[in-house]
Amino acid sequence: MPRLTSISITGSSEIIGGSNAQYRCTAKYSDGSTRDVTTRTRWSENSNYATFTGRGSLETTNVPTDTSFEISASYWRRQANLTVTIKTQDQEPPSTPPPPQEENPPTPPPTQEGRMVIDPITRIEGHLRIETEVTGGRVDKAWSTGTLFRGVEPILKDRNPEDAWLFTQRLCGVCTYVHGSTSVRSVEDALNLIIPANARTIRNLLMGAQYLHDHIIHFYHLHALDWVDVVSALDADSTATRILSEQVTPQADSIDFGAVKNRLQTFVNSGQLGPFANAYWGHDEYVLSPEENLLLASK
């Protein structure tokens, strides 16, 4: 599979203030092929007189005098910059030919038909197998199979029903309460018990807290490694990360990203990445910048 080697920006380097300009980002691969990735690129600029309103679409305002700044494109941990000058309205910028069109644009993958099997489903507690039958691009039938036998049933056999919820909630280290609650309700249904309204309210409050807890734990401990390149965070600029944090969550408490980066560097140098030591750090599918990786690793 060809690997991404570099990206480049094409478009006008001079713009009349108050006008718009469209830029294109092109990715180059190890086999010499190129691809237009404009719509998948993260665009930014460092000017008070310009802002990106869409993928590659730059909008400018009038300037008191000619003003130069840089626009940046980030794609799959690659970055390209282009210096752009906003001209006052009494000047005409040089004409720029439109960017060349890709001769052989990539064709979309064919629609898969028939039986599709995903086994295992990752980033969950336990093992799961999903099978589907696809016809005309639509799923006609689907089967979900839990393939891990926990043995909770024989563990609970002949035990006091009041103890069942303590064992059952150990089914998962992330969403413990929901399993415990289900076990309690099963016992109540077997004994034909009806709980008072206050008890139901308390359970609903606990379930709401579990909902928040589950999402946070699942993302940062299970799912985040599909998105956050921990090693890439070592290349981040701490000041730029602080600015990014203030833009994303201005109400959040401040974080010493320099200190976090140092702790992360110590952790990586210690060789304690454990099962992730030979993982896919640096893979082209990671699209976040080093600053974004450091921000998420700090959370």
Image: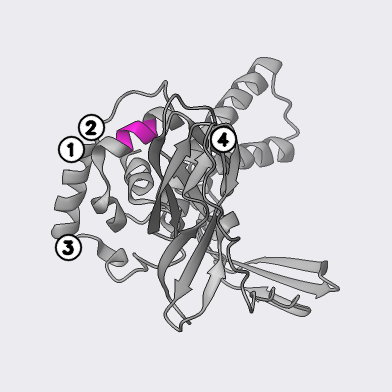
In the picture of the structure, the residue carrying the numbered disc 4 is 211
Number of residue marks: 4
Nearer to me, 56 or 279: 56
- Type of amino acid at the residue the image marks with label 2: Asp
Q: Which residue is mark 1?
A: 259
Residue type highlighted by circle 3: Gly
Q: How has the structure been colored for display?
A: one colour
Secondary structure of the residue carrying numbered label 4: helix
Q: Residue at x 51, y 65 (%)?
A: 26
Looking at numbered disc 4 in the image, what kind of residue is underneath it?
Tyr
Q: CA distance from mark 3 to mark 1?
A: 19 Å
Which residue is nearer to you in this view: 198 or 283? 283
**Type of the residue with mark 1:** Ala
Q: Distance from label 2 to label 3 (Cα)?
A: 24 Å
Q: Secondary structure at mark 1?
A: helix
Q: Residue at x 58, y 45 (%)?
A: 21
Provide residue 168's location: percent of width, then percent of height: 53, 47
Residue wearing tag 3: 271
Which class describes the residues within 10 Å of circle 2: few (<14), some (14-19), or many (20+)? few
Residue in front for this viewpoint, 103 or 204: 103
Observer-side mark, 3 or 4, equals 3
**Image position, residue 108 (x, y; %):** 69, 73
